[in-house]
Amino acid sequence: MKLNILLLVCTLIASTSAQTEEVVVISGHPEWPPFSWQEGDEIIGVGPELLELIFNDLGIKVQSTYTGNWKRVQEEAQSLSVI
């Protein structure tokens, strides 16, 4: 359970920069209220809100997207290479 919460909060799907503005794209479990759930094309809840607070303090914008079911989110996160 603690691992799932950590994965939810720390799952970063991609990180890009547009000119001088850093953007972190996040996702999470689409059916796990109050931590995260799907609303339209976004994942909302406590997890995304917490990440937004943390990254805003660092000057980084957070974009929360619905990527699919939890298995797909984890597979996409694992397929990323970290530089």
Image (spheres, rainbow, N blue to C red):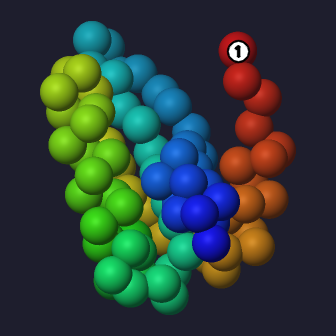
Label 1: which residue? 83
* Near-viewer residue (11 or 66): 11
Task: Tell me how many marks there are.
Answer: 1
Above or below, comparing residue 70 to residue 27 in the picture: below
Residue 42: x and y, percent?
37, 70
Residue farthest front in this picture: 2
How packed mark 1 is, by other alpha carbons closer than 10 Å (few <14, some 14-19, many 20 or more), is few
Above or below, comparing residue 5 to residue 41 in the picture: above
Residue 48 at least partly seen: yes
* Near-viewer residue (75 or 21): 75
Q: Residue 20 occupies which quadrant of the picture?
A: top left
Please report the residue visible at 78 percent of the width from the left and 29 percent of the height from the top.
Answer: 81
Residue 8: x and y, percent?
53, 60
Q: Secondary structure at mark 1?
A: loop
Left or right of 41 on screen, residue 49: left
**Quadrant for the N terminus in the image:** bottom right
Left or right of 49 on screen, residue 70: right
Please report the residue visible at 75 percent of the width from the left and 38 percent of the height from the top.
Answer: 80
Residue 31: x and y, percent?
50, 88
Residue 15: x and y, percent?
51, 31
Above or below, comparing residue 7 to residue 12 in the picture: below
Left or right of 37 on screen, residue 74: right
